[in-house]
Amino acid sequence: MSLVGLSCTPSTFLYTSNSSQPLPKPSNKICYPSSTLNFSTFSGTIFRYGNWVSPRNKFYAKSSDSDVDNREVDTQFSPQNASLSTNGGNPSTSLLSFLCPLLKFFSGGDPSGERNDTLEVLTSSLSSLARFPWGSKSLSDSLGTTNTVDPPMRLQLFEFEACPFCRRVREAITELDLSVEVYPCPKGSLRHREMVRRFGGKEQFPFLIDPNTDITMYESGDIVKYLFEQYGQGRKPSAGLLESTLVTGWVPTLLRAGRGMTLWEKARLDPPPKMLELFSYENNQYARIVREALCELEVPYILQNVGEGSSRSKFLIDAIGSKEVPFLIDPNTGTQIGDYKKILPYLFQTYSTESSTSMPVT
């Protein structure tokens, strides 16, 4: 299940750009971090009732829209031919789209402003409690080893933090201990929603691209099943992960009053040259608050999952002396921060249109 219309590089711990091309100047065209997106192998999209499609070896989940035609959609992306999205997408009849204005009203206004820390942690902790135990633990220990290996190229997930069905996929990614590239798609998105429309043919989330198998997918349930079949090494999703989304999956969205749902009006037009890295696990109450901010800023980032039993725990211990998350690395400024109270102002100050911080050109 997904929400409709609400609106690949090798795995390393520190992202570095391998592109020698200068970044495009800010304009009314879509831009993205260089050396990140490469979709030259995706020549089209076919919706075939959730079956494997040959000879391209792609899986397409059946659309939840009954009026989507079986047709080819050009997914070749070019900054020169992709127009900037200014309205965040097509009108939606989804429940979350209906709730969006109401949740935004109760969200406390400007996300960059001063917050009630007690209330923030309380509502996020209750959200974690509602979703426990999903998204808290890596299942790698069930294999008798913690030395899990990421795919050669990172999976690319287009989603937004407040979406319960995107949350379902992120919980599965935590269990599989995968490192993925996240492209936040908040309502009002300036870049990433347009990419989803061009690559997949419609605005629906979550949307997954696996460059290792040339597969693109909608529908959270199908994505979770695919991830476990492809990268689970015989494991299955933890009991209740798929079914519970319809019961308690909405709780974090409601308790957090729509945080991580809409684009901040002062977010920078163009993304940073290099992707930020966030060490996190889905159900951590402090990491959730940081992911919400990254979504509201539409800043793409590498999500390094560090659930209980994760192979990445050792990296954190070696780097900062503990396994505490969130931990943010910004290679654009050389910043490393491990406290959500410090991460939030840093993000909103650095990636605001009013910021004086200059981004390096790669």
Image (cartoon, rainbow, N blue to C red):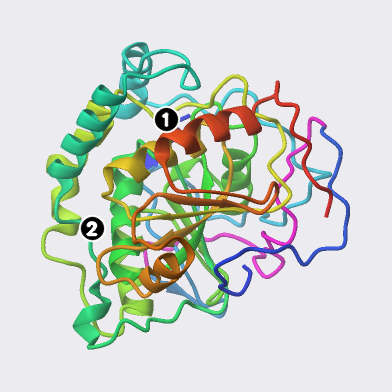
Decide: few, some or many residues near mark 2? Use Cα within 10 Å; few <14, some 14-19, many ≥20. Answer: many
Q: Residue 38 appears at what percent x and percent y?
A: 69, 64
**Residue in the foreground of this view, choosing between 31 and 78:** 31
The structure residue drawn at horizontal position 54% and vertical position 23%, both measured from the top left corner, is 264
Q: Residue 113 appears at what percent x and percent y?
A: 47, 17
The structure residue drawn at horizontal position 77% and vertical position 42%, both measured from the top left corner, is 359
Secondary structure at badge 1 equals: loop
Q: Residue 302 appears at what percent x and percent y?
A: 53, 57
Whether residue 27 is situated above or below residue 273 in the rendered picture: above
Left or right: 305, with 262 as reference point: left
Residue type indicated by callout 1: Met
Residue type indicated by callout 2: Ser
Instruction: Confirm whether the magenta stretch covers residue 302.
Output: no
In the figure, residue 235 lies in which quadrant?
bottom left
Q: Residue 342 appears at what percent x and percent y?
A: 47, 35
Whether residue 80 is situated above or below residue 350 in the rendered picture: below
Left or right: 12, with 281 as reference point: right
- Range covered by the magenta-colored residues: 27-50
Secondary structure at badge 2 equals: loop
Mark 2 vs mark 1, foreground winner is 2
Q: Determine which residue is flagged by label 1.
A: 261
Q: What main secondary structure does the magenta stretch of the protein show?
A: loop
Q: Quadrant of the C terminus?
A: bottom right
Estimate the spatial distance between the alpha carbons at disc 2 and disc 1, rounded to whole Å.
22 Å
Left or right: 355, with 300 as reference point: right
Instruction: Confirm whether the magenta stretch covers residue 48.
Output: yes
In the figure, residue 137 lies in which quadrant?
bottom left
**Residue in the foreground of this view, choosing between 208 and 138:** 138
Name the residue at the bottom extreme.
144
Decide: few, some or many residues near mark 1? Use Cα within 10 Å; few <14, some 14-19, many ≥20. Answer: many
Q: Determine which residue is flagged by label 2.
A: 136
